[in-house]
Amino acid sequence: MDAEFVEFVRHRGDHHLKTAVLLTGDWHTAEDLVQSSLGKLYRAWHRLDTSSNPDAYLRRIMVNTYRSWWRARWRREIPRAELPDLPGPGDAGDARAVAEDVRNALAQVPARQRTALVLRFFVDLPEAEVAGLMGCSVGTVKTHTYRGLQAMRRLISPGTLVNRIEEEGSGIR
């Protein structure tokens, strides 16, 4: 195996796994997505200019792979009779509970909106790059981001502080 590829996976694998968890909303699906994407990246590794930014290559592969999964799996979703209980306003006492609330809410947002939110706010990509990764226009990214934020606002209890900046008067509203 290429030592440079192995080193890249060791140093950046956890970051991409976290991104995949946020994209998919499920740890096991995220592991499958990263594994599948790393396999595709490895097959093309010798052709790529990895000195510039191999993260961008892997990010594009992950988004495209997950996008193809949306199309193939949308009919296999199983409706549930009962939704899981969401924590009440006073239940999120520490940062882990808040992070869990955000992940749970993010998992309930439609896939394209979730992808736009993760790429914009977790990976911190500009709208134009997100549009390129998602295969849509910048306006569509803005729409998905706006609708995703609106859905997140409805899903996360109003008393939950999402970040410290929110205490100072700004942040997610």
Image (tube, rainbow, N blue to C red):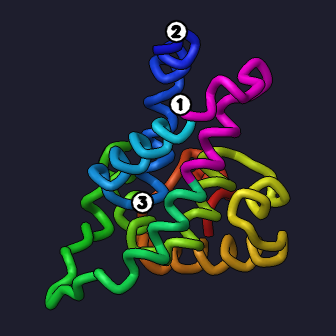
In the image shown, does 159 or 97 lie closer to the viewer?
97
Q: CA distance from mark 3 to mark 2?
A: 29 Å
| 26 relative to 60 in the view: left or right | left
- Specify start and end residues of the magenta stretch as a single range: 42-62
Extreme residue in the top direction: 3
Asked if marks 1 and 3 touch (Cβ < 8 Å), the reply is no
Tell me the tag on residue 10. none
Identity of the amino acid at label 2?
A: Ala
What residue is drawn where x is 23% and y is 88%? 79
Where residue 107 appears, x then y in whole percent?
39, 67
Q: Secondary structure at mark 3?
A: helix
Residue 12 percent coordinates (x, y): 53, 25
The residue wearing badge 1 is 42
* Element type where label 2 sits in the image: helix
Mark 1 or mark 3, earlier in chain: 3
Nearer the observer: mark 3 or 2; the answer is 2
Local crowd size for mark 2, using a 10 Å CA cut-off: few (<14), some (14–19), many (≥20): few
Question: In which quadrant is the C terminus drawn?
Answer: bottom right
Q: Main secondary structure of the magenta part?
A: helix
Q: Which residue is mark 2?
A: 3
Counting from the top left corner in percent of width and height, residue 36 is at: 42, 45
Is residue 130 or residue 47 the one in the foreground? 47
Question: Which residue in the structure is indicated by mark 3?
Answer: 24
Whether the magenta-drawn stretch holds residue 45 is answered as: yes
Q: Earlier in the sequence, mark 3 or mark 2?
A: 2
- Out of 45 and 20, give the one closest to the viewer: 45
Judge from the rendering whether residue 92 lies leftward or rightward of residue 46; answer left or right. Answer: left
